[in-house]
Amino acid sequence: MQAGDITGLVLAGGRGSRMGGVDKGLQNFHGTPLALNALMRLQMQEGGLVGDLMVNANRNLSAYEAFGAPVWPDTLDDFAGPLAGFLTGLERCETPWLLTVPCDSPRFPLDLALRLAQAIEAPDTDIAMAAAREDDGQWRAQPVFCLMKVDLLESLADFTRGGGRKIDRWTGQHRTVVVPFDRPGDDPLAFANANTLDELHALEKP
């Protein structure tokens, strides 16, 4: 994988229902809107692999456009979830690979792109997905942190046309490698997501 081979996509198209219906990507984290914070962390990714940036949003598009990256709403109707964002990103992606990150996990690793890319060793690997240890001590895949081949567009379009909405059911159709983020010094809250304003404020603490 070469410099600039990855397009970074911030997923900010949800309803924000568990946050009272507010537009989650526009809520502040240390004074910076969550979606802008995610864009900045994508720009800062180690290894220079991330080139183009995009945002997937369905409301307040002009506010998102002010962050300086192209903004694309879902092409599927009715807030169809993260896969709708994946589909929108793959439709607009002009690089060989697409990296998705949610707007509501503001501490995701600055070496996310590099470590996912390094895990793709076999040429027929289609997807690399992060995994993290959760509060119960169990390792779980974090499917919204996903590095995927742009060639998967047709597969995802077919899956969603058939009514599919579950990420793992789609990724399970492809050769996927799960990458644990368990090195010394890794932030234990790197993949923690804020579903409420209280959780968001808690993530601001060191």
Image: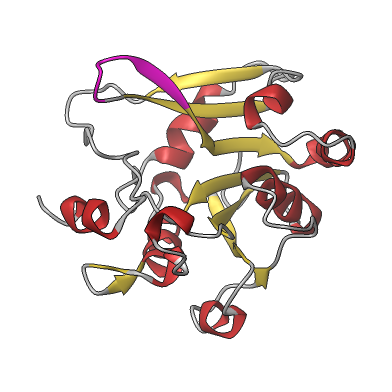
Q: How many marks?
A: 0
Does the magenta portion include 69? no
- In the displayed structure, 123 sits above or below 143; it is above
Q: Position of residue 71 (x, y in %)?
A: 64, 71
Decide if residue 133 is on the left or right side of residue 152: left
Whether residue 78 sits left or right of residue 144 in the image: it is right
Residue 29 quadrant: bottom left
Q: Which residue is at the front of the view, 51 or 155?
A: 155
Q: Quadrant of residue 72?
A: bottom right
Residue at 56% across, 46% down: 100
Residue 64 point in image, percent of width and height: 53, 77
For image coordinates 21% across by 68% down, the residue present is 30
In this view of the protein, which residue sits in the foreground, 24 or 120? 24
How is the rendered protein coloured?
secondary structure
Task: Judge by depth and name the residue closer to the eye, 170 or 80.
Answer: 80
Residue drawn at x 9%, y 50% is: 206
Question: Which quadrant holds the N terminus?
Answer: top right
Task: Tell me where the magenta segment starts and ends, as one range.
Answer: 135-141
Q: Is residue 26 above or below residue 4?
A: below
166 shown above or below 205: above
| Residue 189 at x, y percent in the picture | 24, 38
Tell me residue 53's x, y (percent).
58, 62
- Whether residue 138 is in magenta: the answer is yes
Please give left or right for residue 193 compared with residue 50 in the image. left
Residue 84 higher or lower than 121, as above or below: below
Q: Is residue 113 left or right of residue 168?
A: left
Q: Residue at x 59, y 37 (%)?
A: 147
